[in-house]
């Protein structure tokens, strides 16, 4: 085993515990885990026989880290099946060598790979919450051999973000029409404000280089219709897939430039950008409809509402090169170069201290990742208070961790109140039954007495006659 760890590649899905680690026993599935029904009784190392009398080995004892063979189906399918069967993490064992890895031995008839494989999301990985790594063949072969010799191996999967100083930097890549980041942007403004100048936020707009994608012809004309601005220089995908109606790619580019300018004038200085958060949220509420997306009146209305000077933003958009003429736009060029340098592939994408953050774009995931980006001992108070809190979002908004109401658990106050309520209810039921029983008994006694009363009267008459 290597004390300094093994080289690996992280999956572009799942939710790693940033700033933490997972340390568990590792089991080799001896399977590619492509079938929905997984035989958890197979694999290595060998375990004792199961107690159900089936003659099979005991299943992998959860929690565990599962090593799975690469191939046959997508990475997402493998990890999802492992998650469903109790795995805390997954290591995909590569089945082919990189051509540059001279120490790697390829299987007979299997050619080497020129490029490192990417554990990409197939589009359905949002339900996966466990992390996964791809381990290169020369390393995974050694671990598999040890496991097949029935050696007990413990693996540590750790995540540490670059933490150079007492200020964390985080970036968000998205497009104005992205539905997946609306909830995040709505809720994360509170965290951005609470972190203040201890963190620096930078929003980015994802655009396509029309020159590289051949949207600009030899005569400087636009070959990509209404997907691009500036005669084909800057492009975006059509969000509704209809080039004849609805929001066009060019509309997306124009709105992207507007947001870049809003950040430049209202966010760059402090790295918080309250006005930017407010504008994006109000736009999503009031102007995201296809009929209002590029409405001057709608955009002006929300800018006035969030105290943004519309003339300043219009001048910024024009001074950078605009979106009409066949000429470059300096701000859009900066975004395209930044995208190429970072290597953004999947949207929305977030980075903390230039490290990609995997998993769904959710408040808790990003907040914990940002707080893990500080040098040890320099974390701001909001991180120390709210990261360990079960309700991190509520903690950030309120400034305190409400320990009496945590997530799906029942608070002590509510529990005691419920028990008192039930006790009072049952006490009333018992009292009602007691009173009902007493009434019935009195009624029966009166009935019995009534039956004997005539006998007493008759006896009295008889005594009188005899005397």
Image: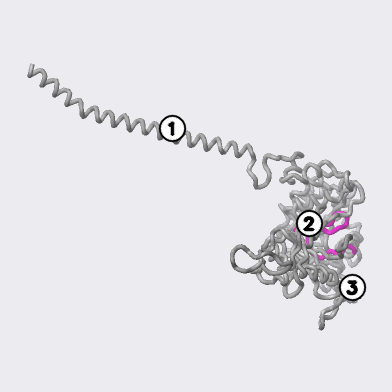
Q: In this view, does 265 lie to the left or right of 44?
A: right
CA distance separating discs 1 and 3: 91 Å
* Mark 3 neighbour density, 10 Å: few (under 14) some (14–19) many (20 or more): some
Front position in the image: 376 or 68: 68
Tell me the distance, in whole angstroms, between the alpha carbons under discs 3 and 2: 58 Å
Marker disc for residue 220: 3
Q: Are marks 1 and 2 in contact (CB under 8 Å)?
A: no
In the rendered structure, which segment of residues is drawn in magenta?
341-359
Q: Mark 2 points at which residue?
A: 23
- In the image, 417: left or right of 196? left
**Where, quadrant-wise, is the C terminus in this rendering?**
top left
Camera-side mark, 1 or 3: 1
As helix, strand or loop, the secondary structure at mark 3 comes to loop
Q: Tell me, yes or no, if residue 179 can be seen here.
A: no
Task: Give the structural element (helix, strand or loop) at label 1.
Answer: helix
Whether residue 37 appears in this view of the structure is yes
CB atoms at circles 1 and 3 under 8 Å apart? no
Res. 249 mark: none
- What whole-number distance in Å separates the C-alpha atoms at marks 1 and 2? 58 Å
Of the two numbered discs 1 and 2 on the same chain, state the one appearing first in sequence.
2
Q: Is residue 342 magenta?
A: yes
Count of picture labels: 3
Q: Which residue is drawn at 63% across and 43% down?
A: 410
Q: Position of residue 440 (x, y in %)?
A: 33, 33
Q: Which of 223 and 52 is in front in this view?
A: 52
First along the sequence among labels 1 and 3: 3
Q: Which residue does the numbered mark 1 point to in the structure image?
A: 431
What residue lies at 58% left-to-right and 36% top-to-bottom? 417
* Residue at 80 percent of width and 74 percent of height: 95
Q: Earlier in the sequence, mark 3 or mark 2?
A: 2
Q: Does the magenta stretch include residue 61?
A: no
């Amino acid at each position: 085993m290597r004390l300094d760890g093994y080289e690996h590649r992280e999956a572009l899905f799942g939710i790693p515990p940033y700033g933490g680690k997972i340390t568990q026993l590792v089991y080799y599935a001896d399977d590619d885990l492509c079938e929905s029904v997984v035989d958890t009784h197979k694999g290595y190392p060998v375990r004792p026989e199961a107690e159900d009398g089936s003659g099979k080995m005991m299943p992998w004892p959860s929690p565990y880290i599962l090593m799975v063979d690469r191939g046959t189906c997508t990475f997402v399918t493998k990890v999802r099946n492992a998650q469903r069967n109790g795995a805390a993490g997954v290591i995909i064992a590569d089945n082919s060598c990189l051509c540059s890895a001279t120490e790697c031995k390829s299987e007979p008839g299997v050619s080497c790979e020129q490029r490192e494989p990417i554990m990409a999301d197939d589009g359905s990985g949002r339900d996966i919450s466990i992390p996964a790594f791809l381990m290169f063949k020369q390393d995974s072969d050694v671990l598999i051999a040890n496991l097949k010799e029935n050696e007990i191996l413990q693996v540590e999967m750790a995540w540490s973000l670059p933490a150079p100083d007492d200020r964390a930097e985080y970036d968000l890549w998205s497009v104005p029409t992205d539905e997946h980041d609306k909830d995040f942007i709505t809720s994360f403004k509170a965290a951005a404000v609470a972190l203040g100048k201890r963190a620096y936020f930078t929003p980015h707009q994802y655009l396509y280089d029309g020159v590289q994608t051949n949207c600009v012809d030899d005569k400087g004309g636009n070959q990509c219709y209404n997907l691009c601005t500036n005669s084909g220089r800057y492009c975006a995908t059509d969000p509704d897939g209809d080039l004849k109606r609805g929001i066009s790619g060019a509309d997306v580019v124009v709105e992207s430039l507007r947001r870049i300018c809003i950040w430049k004038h209202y966010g760059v200085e402090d790295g918080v950008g309250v006005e930017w958060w407010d504008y994006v949220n109000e736009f999503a509420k009031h102007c995201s409809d296809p009929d209002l997306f590029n409405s001057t009146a709608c955009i002006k209305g929300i800018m006035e509402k969030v105290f943004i000077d519309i003339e300043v933003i219009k001048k910024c958009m024009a001074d950078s090169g605009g979106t009409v003429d066949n000429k470059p736009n300096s701000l859009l060029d900066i975004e395209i170069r930044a995208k190429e340098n970072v290597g953004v592939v999947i949207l929305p994408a977030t980075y903390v201290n230039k490290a990609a953050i995997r998993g769904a774009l959710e408040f808790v995931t990003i907040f914990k990742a940002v707080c893990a980006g500080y040098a040890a001992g320099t974390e701001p108070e909001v991180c120390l208070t709210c990261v360990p809190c079960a309700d991190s979002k509520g903690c950030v908004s309120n400034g305190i961790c409400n320990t009496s109401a945590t997530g799906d658990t029942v608070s002590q106050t509510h529990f005691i109140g419920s028990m008192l309520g039930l006790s009072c209810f049952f006490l009333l039921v018992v009292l009602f039954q007691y009173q009902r029983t007493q009434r019935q008994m009195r009624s029966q006694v009166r009935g019995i007495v009534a039956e004997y009363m005539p006998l007493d009267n008759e006896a009295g008459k008889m005594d009188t006659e005899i005397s």
